[in-house]
Amino acid sequence: MTFSEILSAVYDECNYLASPASGVVTRVKRLVNEGQRLMLSEPGLQRLADSDAPFTVASVASQARYVLPEAVARITGMRETTNDLALGAMDLARYRHVDPDPTATTGTPTHYVPIGRVAVAVQPADASQIFVKSDSASDTTQVVYIEGVITGGYLRTASVTITGTTAVTLSSAITSFIEITDFYLSAAAVGTVTLHEDSGLGTELARVTIGATRPRYYGFYLWPTPSAAVTYSVDYRRELVDLVNNTDEPPLPTDIHPALVAYAVAREKEKTGDTNGSLQAMARYQKFLKHLKYQTQTLSDEIPVLGRGAMVGRSRLGAWFPADHWS
C-alpha cells in the first residue's frame, strides 16, 4: 500500500470525508509514521531497516576516531578482508579502561567501539575560532548556530547569518572552541553548508547537506588504534525516513501494510473517545505484529531437533578439515 492508500483507508474506517480537514490530515500522517517507527523498533524487527550493501570506511594510521554519515542509525557489524577479521563490539567504558591512551598503542584493530550520535565529524585540533560557509551564493538568510566548550571547560553558544560562499566567523569574540556539541541551521539551505576551524579554508569539522538543518554522524573508535590504512565494511541499521509523498511505501512486507492503518485508526479513535473502536483496531495491529515477528524471526527451512545441532562456519585449515565451527 502506498502512503496515499494507507491514509485513505484510515479516513474511511474513521468515517471521515475522503479529503478531511487539514488538521485531521496532519494528525493521521503523524500517527501512520508513529506506527511505522514503533513497529520497526520492536525487538527482532529492527533488522527490516538493516542495510543491504555495507558502507565502507578506510582507517588512517594512528587515528582512533571515525564517523559514519547520516544514513547510519547504528552499527550492526564490522569486518575487513585485508587481515580476514570480523571485529567484535566493545563498550566505551571498557575501551577507556583497557586503553587510557589510544595514541600510545597501535596495531591491527580487533574491536570497534560505538559512541553513537556525534555533532561533528571532526573536533577542533586545538582551541580555535569557528567559520561557516555555503557552496551556494543563494544562502544569505539562514542563521547558523553552534554550541560548544571553550578552553577551561566553559559552555558557549554562537550564531551568525550565512553570507553565501564567503566564509564568516561564528565566534569573533570566541577564539578558543575545543569541542563542538551542536551545529544547526534556522532553515534548510540551497547548498551544502560546512563548518571549519581557524578560517574558511581550515579543516572541515562538519557539513549540513541540502535540505537538512543539522548534520548527523554516528561515531566509533577502532581498537587498538590502527597502524595502517585498511578498508572496513560496516553493516548498519538505516536511519528510518518518514512516509511523506503519496507514492511512498513502508519498508514492510506488503501483507503487513494494513497494520499501519490499524495503528492509526486505534490512536485516532482513542482521541475521539471511541474506546471500543480503539481497542478493536489495536487488537488488529497486535495480530499483524505477531505475524510479522514470526515471518522475520523464523527461517523457512528451520527444523527443530533434540540436542545440539551442527554449527555453521568455516575451516581455516583447508578443504580436508571439517568446517563445523570457527576457531
Image (cartoon, helix red, strand yellow):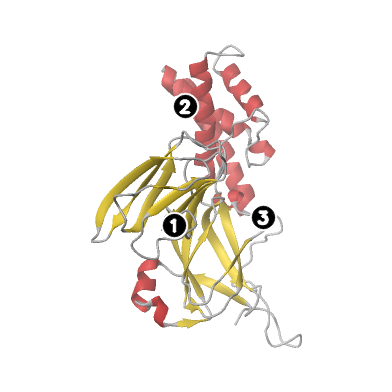
Task: Give the quarter of the image for residue 244.
Answer: top right
Task: Please provide percent x and percent y for residue 69.
Answer: 55, 54
Q: How many marks?
A: 3
Residue occupied by mark 1: 116
Tag in front: 2 or 3: 3
Circle 3 crowding by C-alpha within 10 Å: few under 14, some 14–19, many from 20? few
Cα separation, mark 2 vs mark 1, equals 31 Å
* Above or below 170: residue 100: below
Q: Going by the image, does 245 lie left or right of 152?
A: right
Residue 278: in sight, yes or no?
A: no
Secondary structure at badge 2 equals helix
Q: Identify the disc placed on residue 306.
A: none
Residue density around tag 2, few if under 14, some if 14–19, many if 20 or more, within 10 Å: many
Q: Quadrant of the N terminus?
A: top right
Q: Which of these two is toward me, 127 or 111? A: 127
Three-letter code for the amino acid on which mark 3 is drawn: Asp
Q: Nearer the viewer, residue 173 or 314?
A: 173
Q: Quadrant of residue 4?
A: top right
Q: Secondary structure at mark 3?
A: loop
Q: Amino acid at mark 1?
A: Gly
Give the SS element for disc 1. strand
Q: CA distance from mark 2 to mark 3?
A: 33 Å
What's the CA distance linking mark 3 and mark 1? 21 Å
Task: Determine which residue is flagged by label 3.
Answer: 52
Determine the residue located farthest toward the front in the rendered image.
166
Q: Which mark is residue 267?
A: 2
x%, y% of residue 121?
47, 58
Label 2 vs 1, first from the N-terminus: 1
Instruction: Tell me which amino acid carries mark 2.
Output: Arg
**Above or below: residue 14 compared with residue 182:** above
